[in-house]
Every structure is written in structure tokens, then in C-alpha cells.
Amino acid sequence: MTDYGHDLTEAVVPYATFKSAGFSISFATEIGKPQNAIKRYAHQLVSLPGGHDKGVQQVIDSASIQQHLVSYFPQTRKAGGAGKTIAAICHGALGLSEAKGLDGQSVLFGASTTALPGAMEQGFFWATRAVLGDYYRTYGAGSESVEAAVRRSLRDSEKQYKNSHSTSPFVVFDETYNYVSGRFPPDAQLLAKKAIEVVRGNLK
């Protein structure tokens, strides 16, 4: 998680859902001691909440966190992986897309995903601009949308990027990896429940 700027719903709703499922939970920040939880690869699930404002750049741009994700994501491969699972919502998917291996490709290069739709992000920005300025544009007004950045990291964005402009909960399962993604706060509970199903399925 970031020190500030993460979306409370996208963090708290999955936390409560994981807790009620009996999961042991550790929070990890870029430089805090809890980050050791990521280093111990005994954990079955990494969940990346999204957020807004400039604070979420801390996770998206962190070389340390990108290194952890580059190491962890291959362990989620359904065939020959280590039975790990990863869930990401909103800017969390952007953090994953920025995690690149030595070949320069994102860990999401061959995966199916969703993220915060560009139209929604633009709508939030324009609806609040008079009061909040560029709060809803993480890298400032005129910067690339989350959707555009995530699409750019994929091999074939037309096939791999899944989208819905409905306000009903919507998540995407990848076929190759134990990876579940969501768009924005209304997806948080469904995302957590589906991630739990994947983890439990891997433990059978």
C-alpha cells in the first residue's frame, strides 16, 4: 500500500472479506517493516488496492515493489507455478503493468486484465476539477489514463484488456495466471471473494 492516496474501499473491503474467510493478513508499504511479508513467499495471495491523487505513485513507481512483483507474478502461473494468487484493482493493475522483467516486458504482457476505465477516470476528473484540481489524475492533468497505460503493457490489448462501463461489480480472471483484476471500488468485494475462491482452489 501507499503511505497515502490509496482508496479506502479498495483496501478495507478486501481486508474485511479476507479476514472473514480466515486469512492471516499483513499490510506492506514501500519502506515499512511490514514489507517483509512480501519477501516471505509463503503467502498465497498478494492484493494490490488502487487509489488516486499523487500518493499512489509511490507503489506504481517503486523499483523495490516492482522487483517483488516481477518475482512473485510468475509463481501465479496455473501450469508449473507455485500456486500463488494475485489480485489488483484500479491503480493496483497499473502497478502490475509497470513491473517489468529483464526483457523489458510487463508481468502483464501475456495476461488478461481490467483496470480503471479511461472514460470513468476522465469523468471523475472533470466532475471534480473545479474543487479538487487534478486530484483524479495521478500524474497530473493531461497525463495518460490508467487504462491507456495498462493497455500499452499488453501483447494484444484488444484481446487482453477487458472492460465494462456498468456500475455492477465486474472482475476479470486470467486463463494462464491466478490473477484477478477489478476496476474501481464497487468491484472490491467481488474481487476479494473471487480471489479467495482461487486461493482455496489452489490449496485442494
Image (cartoon, rainbow, N blue to C red):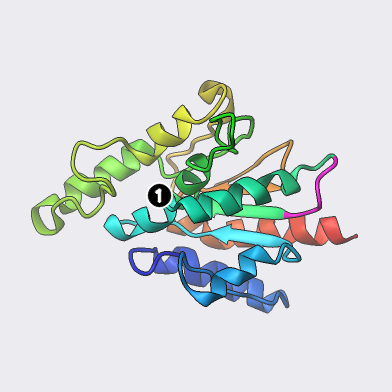
Q: Position of residue 1 (x, y in %)?
A: 46, 65
Q: Is residue 92 left or right of residue 195?
A: left
Residue 115 in sight:
yes
Residue segment shown in magenta? 80-84
Location of residue 141 by image quarter = top left
Q: Residues within 10 Å of mark 1 (few under 14, many from 20)?
A: some
Please report the residue visible at 21 percent of the width from the left and 55 percent of the height from the top.
Answer: 135
Disc 1 is placed on an element classified as: loop
Residue 173 coordinates in the image, percent (x, y): 66, 43
Most extreme residue toward the right is 204
Q: Residue furthest front?
A: 102
Number of on-image labels: 1
Q: Is residue 169 visible?
A: no
> Could you tell me the amino acid type at mark 1?
Asp
Assign the magenta stretch its main secondary structure. Answer: loop
Left or right of 81 in this view: 132: left
Residue 119 or residue 92, whichever sits in front = 92
The residue drawn where x is 68% and y is 56% is: 194
Who is closer to the viewer here, 201 or 71?
71
Which residue lies under the disc numbered 1?
Answer: 61
